[in-house]
Amino acid sequence: MHRRTPIHLRRAGTSVIIDLATPGYPSILHWGEDLGDLSDLQLEHLAVASEPQRVSGGLDTPARLTILPLESHGWQNEPGLIGSRRGLAFSPTFGPVDVHMLPSDAGLVLEAVDEVAALKISSSLTLDSAGLLHQKHTLTNLGDSAYDLQHLLATFPLPSSARELLDTTGRHLRERFPQRHAFTTGRHVRDSRRGRPGADATLFLAAGTPGFAFERGLVHALHLAWSGSQRISAERSVAGHALLQAGELLSAGELSLAPGESYTTPDAIGSWGDGLTALSSRFHESIRARENHPTLPRPVTLNTWEAVYFDLDVDRLRRLADAGARVGIERFVLDDGWFRGRRDDTAGLGDWYVDEQVWPQGLGPIIDHVTGLGMQFGLWVEPEMVNADSDLARAHPDWILQSEAGLPLESRQQQVLDLSNPAVFDYLLERLDAILTEYDVAYLKWDHNRDLLEAGSPITGRVAVHENVVALYRLLDEIRRMHPGVEIESCASGGARVDLGILEHTDRIWTSDCIDPIERLTIQKYTNIVIPYELMGAHVSGPHSHSTGRRHELTLRAGVALPGHFGIEWDISRLDDAGLDAVAAWVDAHKRIRELAHTGRSVHADLPDSSADLRGLVSQGGERALFVYTQVTTSTSYPPEALTFPGLDDERSYRVSLAEPTARLDGPGQSPLSWAEQPITLSGRALRTRGIQAPVLFPEHLVLIDFTAI
Ligand code: DGJ
């Protein structure tokens, strides 16, 4: 019997084998470890080896897990495509499948038509240079009636060893905390119906061998590069299938394809690894290979929000800028409150004109002051939003997303504009362009402070979440095209819009409104599984956390923020000289390590004692590393146990020392720690396996440990 030879994609230590002859639609036979150079015969035999047997009580042709599993081929779990023509054409079946290889065999595009349902599907599978697997589908309506699309999902198979799930959940001020459970029969579904991913969204859904961790265990994960409503799920069936699925979550009637119209899914991105660190490295490498990835050092930022909130007194801001320049700040960002009618968060959104009462001479004087001190100037905006109490809302009530019954419930006293309305788009583009043209603004902090509800466009009457995300991406691109040097931060009530879709159009995310370093340890650790540090805003707050009420030493606050896109969000103009010197020392420390943090590998140790946290930055060549060791709560043993360091080069010898500004241990009075007193040299292998004595630290204290290869 002759069958089509499966296609073998191989890159960056990853193999993906695609069987074109699977009944129904092509399937992925293998996604994971590089299987080496396989002959055609071996590939064909792999396909044969994957064929299931018919079983009692089942279908005569057992269902197969394809990249578009459909009921027409026996799939009785979540189908990849659901839609109909007012109830008809409800069960598509596509074939035969045409295959087009992409240049350099980096992937392929599959195309097939269903003549009866009058639909065409086109699917692309790409293995990028970092070994990430990208999947997208495009559905085209070939018929002469509308096709109502309910969902179109990307489907990735999992190995049978995947028995435990990990994803993230959270809320405002506590985004991306991990949750784990057994991967049993059934579906684990993470839906976001918020019109943005939301604070509770999962950044990824991972499935692996029980107990998988950062350093060990085969694990696969899926991320959806999309900034609107979305679904990510994992499913295990009694027929032995295990899979990850992801796609946009559409509302009733939201996406109706007119004759000839197409819909393309967001990019669903799969990674795998032996441990989460390996899985996450693929994301980082792929993101860093993007053409638009920032290459200049990330400017140390001073953001005015937690420093002054709405108290935008110009003299006070000048003093803050002076203090910023004194400690080494490179970018000063004026947050919320500068525009017409904005004295607090109840009014003004939408009126993007400088408030003449607060700034009689416009923003020029403060910008000149900031740039005169050698810093860039950044400005906060929240273009998609509007307050009822604004000139814009009064003039254009029909520019606001709403249902036929009227406006949705308010959130932070605000509503959302319908960016899919060209008049709204043009107004925002004109306003933003005018500001960026008039002023020397190097950076926009682009906020989005509410979930969407009943997000209907007054123009069509239909839900327009999808259209709004598409329009947002277009608006961001247009601004970047018109003002090429301007960088944009994606902020959304802190970290409620963190995804690789928005990062295609912006330059960093604001990770969370919570800057409490203890909370940030977890938030940053799990955000970092997908997002590299250079794209992750990490600021040092004042001693007293505004979101948790806790107090922390500068060392902890700054040490936790150190690897990220570092900044200060604190009224440092009130500090005395010694206080400013201490802050300046941390700004210096960040400047010394930012290249390492923003180009190196990020590793997280799996410590047996959960009272501590150890995370590291290792240069790509292994010549240098910096680890941040935090005693989070009191240690179980006293002194704590040995620390072992992942990610170093086994074959190199490293000089190990405490790094400034933590070179002096502030422990509760024990004898000196030998290796900290007298520098030692150990091999990467010994450091990974035997390790070194952990320092005794008070809880909520940290030290930096430096490794320099000799
Ligand atoms: C929410 C953001 O996350 C904060 O940093 C700040 O910019 C406020 N919005 C301003 O309203």
Image (cartoon, helix red, strand yellow):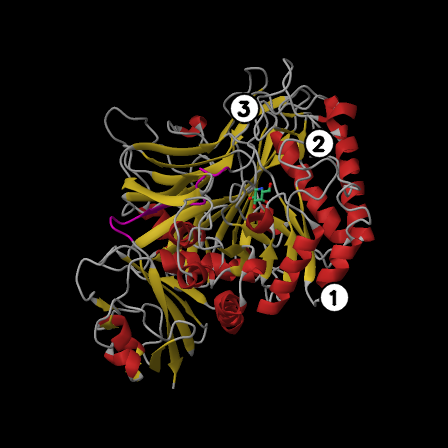
Comes first in the chain, label 2 or label 1 = 1
Residue at screen point 71% across, 61% down: 370
Q: Position of residue 684 (x, y in %)?
A: 31, 77
Let me know if residue 397 appears in the view: yes
Residue that mark 3 sits on: 83
Mark 1 residue's CB less than 8 Å from ligand 1: no
Name the one closer to the observer, 508 or 106: 508
Mark 2 or mark 3: which is in front?
2
Residue type, numbered disc 1? Gly
Please give the label number shown on residue 372: 1
- Residue 250: image quadrant is top right
Instruction: Tell me the quarter of the picture where residue 185 sits.
Output: top left
Q: Which disc number belongs to residue 420?
A: 2
Circle 2 residues within 10 Å: few <14, some 14–19, many ≥20: many
> Considering the numbered disc 2 on the image, is that residue within a helix, a strand or a loop?
loop
**Which amino acid type corresponds to the residue marked 3 in the rendered image?**
Gly
Distance between mark 2 and mark 1 Cα atoms: 40 Å
Placement of 445 over or under 172, stated as above or below: below
Looking at the image, can residue 2 be seen? no
- Is 350 inside the magenta-drawn segment? no
